Amino acid sequence: MSSVLHPPDASALQAGSMLPEPWVVVSRLEENADTFTIELRPAEEGTLRPFAPGQFNMLYAFGTGESAISISGSPENSDTRVHTIRRVGTVTSALDRLAPGDTIGLRGPFGSAWPIEELPGRDLVFVAGGIGLAPLRPAILHALAHRKDYGRIVILAGARSPEDLIFHDELLEWKEEPDVEVKLTVDRAGIDWYHHVGVVTTLIPQADFDPANAVAMVCGPEIMMRFTAVELNKNGLPDSRLFVTLERNMKCAVGICGHCQFGPEFICRDGPVFRYDHIHHWFSQREV
Amino acid sequence: MSTTLEPLLRKHPLFSGFDDDSIHLITSCAKNVRFHEGDLVAKQGEPADEFFLIREGRIAMEMPSPQGLMRLQTSDAGDVVGWSWLVPPYDWHFDLRAVSNVRAFSIDGRCLRNKCESDPRFGYTMMKRFSKMMADRLEATRLQLIDIYGAPADTTAP
């Protein structure tokens, strides 16, 4: 096993990596009962940096604290940054209280990215559980914006209930795109729900992709990703063509503090996106 | 009718590897059925004298709950719906409803039960295949029960 103490990557300590810069809330949208989306623009010139799908920013609610939040907007949009956030603690609750015109601190972008630009000609399989659709959305938007570069696109999204699905209208719009298959499922629903009912893994055998040519990108709670990987394996997709994104309580975001250690990896620096065969072993370790 | 059903049933994974006699028998127990969107396909508590192989469309398993009628699982083309025909007391455990227009094969459960009783090798194979299906559904149900999409139970979450 490699050392758990890595020196910080010099490239990570660039401008904007340690000192939050002021960003202004442009808009706010309620996605469901506990999830909201905010759009931000830099308050100062020169602080807007490009990002790759899958990366995250550290959002700082003044007086409360920082939280690592994946970027959920299009990488094609260079003027603003979009974040979709679930209220789970004090920082995310403080971010929830923001209104257009309010200012927050932002550091980033940080971390590894979905390998979307390295996959021309491939079938793309996106599997999302709950708010896991948010970190996948930039990769999906990129793939749709460069549609001719890819084979089939399959998007499988699961949630507890119809009310918990995020980006619902957008998912239905994506479904209308050529050669894009969108399947939605929930754990339970009323009789007005006409999509699937069942756990998201049950959608995989029905999905139309070429396992010899497909790459899967999966985001959701770890147990969901673990069972999704098993089902993708059963359907011919090896771990080496399967990518997941992990979440831990990130603090420094540049691989110094160790809060987000996952086995020998620091999720903020080495992840959050990992090729599954590189971290597969740690998924089954309950204490990690 | 049987001549058109037989090649389709023979190709279905549920019946793969069965010998010709078994396929002939299964075919003789099968018929094509259609349901319109909203039709009740089976009713909880009533005799489960058949099961379905969906060819097209979607069927939902429904159950009354304190929140009203709930959909707990759906099945689509290629799926097998119903195992109550194989397990006493041979009654449906849930309602089944067509969520869309459905084309399916209906297989007569009593007919197959008789074959299972008289031909233990055939019966054991059927039992193994339905047990696998039941185990898969049990695992999926467990995942639904543990709320795999929920926020981590970590009170230190930021």
Image: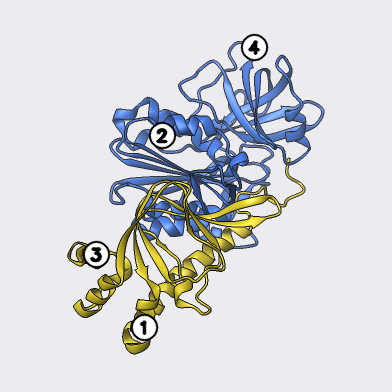
- Kindly state the secondary structure of the residue where label 1 is placed: helix
**Badge 3 amino acid:** Lys
Residue at horizontal 60 percent and vertical 53 percent from the top: B148
Q: Nearer the viewer, residue A121 or A2?
A: A121
Display colour for chain B: yellow
Q: Quadrant of residue B147?
A: bottom right
Q: Which residue is mark 3?
A: B11
Residue at horizontal 54 percent and vertical 43 percent from the top: A193
**Badge 4 amino acid:** Glu
Q: Above or below — where is A53 with respect to A130? A: above
Q: Is residue B156 left or right of residue A239?
A: right
Q: Nearer the viewer, residue A208 or B107?
A: B107
Q: Chain of mark 4?
A: A
**Badge 2 amino acid:** Lys
Label 1 in the same subunit as label 4: no
Kindly report the distance in space between the C-alpha atoms of the residues bearing marks 2 and 3. 30 Å
Kindly report the distance in space between the C-alpha atoms of the residues bearing marks 1 and 4. 79 Å
Which quadrant would the N terminus of chain B be assigned to in this image? bottom left
Q: Chain of mark 3?
A: B
Tell which chain the image draws in blue: A
Residue at the left extreme of this rendering:
B3
Q: So how many labels did they put on this image?
A: 4
Which quadrant would the C terminus of chain B be assigned to in this image? top right
Q: Position of residue A190 (x, y in %)?
A: 60, 46
Q: Are marks 4 and 2 in contact (CB under 8 Å)?
A: no
Q: Which mark is residue A44?
A: 4
Kindly report the distance in space between the C-alpha atoms of the residues bearing marks 3 and 1. 23 Å
Kindly report the distance in space between the C-alpha atoms of the residues bearing marks 4 and 3. 65 Å
Kindly report the distance in space between the C-alpha atoms of the residues bearing marks 4 and 2. 38 Å
- Kindly state the secondary structure of the residue where label 4 is placed: loop
Q: Which residue is mark 1?
A: B114
